[in-house]
Image (cartoon, grey):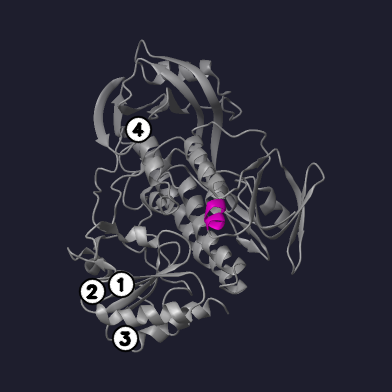
Amino acid sequence: MNTAVLIVGAGPTGLTLGCSLARAGAAVRIIDKTPEFHRGSRGKGLNQRSRELLADLGLDEELTAAGTEHIVLRKYRDGVPVADTRSWDSMEARPDVPYSSGLLLPQWRTEELLRGKLAEYGVRVELGCELTGFTQDEQGVRATLADGRTIEADYLAGCDGGKSFVRKALGVGFEGETAAEEMMVLGDVEVDGLDRGFWHQWFGEGGGIMLCPFRGTSHWQLQGAAGTDERGRLPEPTLEVFQDLFDRVAGVPGVRLANPTWQSTYRVNVRMADRFREGRVFIVGDAAHVHSIAGGLGMNTGIQDAFNLGWKLALVIGGHAGPGLLDTYEEERLPVAAWTLKTSNEGLRRIVEGVPAGRIGTDVGANAETSTLGVGYRWSSLSGGAGEERAADGDGLAAGDRAPDAPCRDAATGRPVRLFEKFAGPGHTLLGFGPHSAKVLARAGEEYAGPLRTCLIDGGPEGLDDHEGHARAAYGMEGDGVVLVRPDDYVALRLTGDAPDRGAAVVDYLRRLGR
């Protein structure tokens, strides 16, 4: 059976890619070698940028209802509470940033919601389907499964984790190291005797243990530094090991752990692929980069990889862009992966240095940097028009930056409308500020045959009314001007009122995608 894209791996990365493609009308299949869906909490946090992108897929209400914002981290020393720290306390919601907090929820729940969204497009994960080989040529990819079946696809995306079969089959280098500092036992357990209003964290000379509750479930995620034997091996992650570690490190009597539903061990690898694409085959998420859990960037980086690749594949498959657009996936995401490894390594260093002084848990996983709201692509060939000078770091909003949100009103009805609502969905969005931008929007809509939404702001009875000035402030528009926003909600082009022939510049940019 032919398909446009075969996705290998049905974790958050593969599911996000599947949703991005399916809603754009691309034929997609997603396979996973496991016989049943995972129920482990594993990657348990969505940062603000991932929340924005998954909201673009229509999952905002469901995710917010399932997760916890601003959880309080309670730290202990020698069994005694010494500090309560509210996560993401240094950030606040602003007109341009709708989420003041990341979202804490188990990975199985995130996957469940993504599978539900994917099913709305008629696509379901095919379990028990193990990829054992593939070949590719100029026409497409031919994949072979363990049961002898074959799948023919235009493209293949390996979202199959750190031990990726796809990456290994491509012969892609995966250089790096194993960090001896971070070895842990993990599990999902029920806990009797602790207040579920806190993420409890104990650290001391004998190790460390953390217990994080999940909203709407009876389980907590346990993370523990259990120590190793004389051969450097971690103990088996059993309930007995969990209870012994808690009793020894926490020193809180009367707390009992029970009913483990997921148990695992973890030793961090810090590695990155030397390329993210080989012909018609891509590697995405953990298949392309793995790193420390410090900062909680792993699952989030995979989701953002998938969103970046998804819109580009969709435009190419739909005939609205040339295959050269796919080169920009590696161009844009490989530097971000390198930044992610560096940032998580720095977070791990702070953890290791902070444990003896009891400082851990306050600034590693919940800060402006790990929100990834500031991650952008100013260096990208997709940022700005032909020959346009790149903006320097520290300048105002520029091509390649995250497109800000803003509260506006429907000019005709007065109904509140956020810019993110206008951006949602496949295709680019062209914002026009001021009445003279209406002609630019009309010309782009007429001359570009691909998916494009237009939105006029402060242009009269149609479009949006920037009644409080937040949209103009966010986009640096005092008079007339236009901003082209990419399908993944980054600024592609920003032209102020004095820019010559803005309509031609917008159409030229969009047409260049097809080359």
Q: Is residue 452 visible?
A: yes
Residue that mark 3 sits on:
499
The residue drawn where x is 68% and y is 64% is 280
Q: Earlier in the sequence, mark 4 or mark 1?
A: 4
The residue drawn where x is 53% and y is 31% is 40
Tag 1 near tag 2, CB within 8 Å: yes
Q: Quadrant of residue 453?
A: bottom left
Left or right, 39 with respect to 78, comes to: right
The residue drawn where x is 46% and y is 54% is 340
Total residue callouts: 4
Q: Which mark is residue 356?
A: 4
- Label 4, label 1: how far apart the Cα atoms are: 56 Å
Tag 4 near tag 1, CB within 8 Å: no
Q: Earlier in the sequence, mark 2 or mark 3?
A: 2
Q: Which mark is residue 331?
A: none
Q: How far across and down, in percent of the image, does residue 440 sit?
A: 36, 81
Crowd tier of the residue under label 4, counting other residues whose Cα lies within 10 Å: few below 14, some 14–19, many 20 or above: few
Q: Which mark is residue 460?
A: 2
- Label 2, label 3: how far apart the Cα atoms are: 22 Å
Residue that mark 1 sits on:
456
- Label 1, label 3: how far apart the Cα atoms are: 18 Å
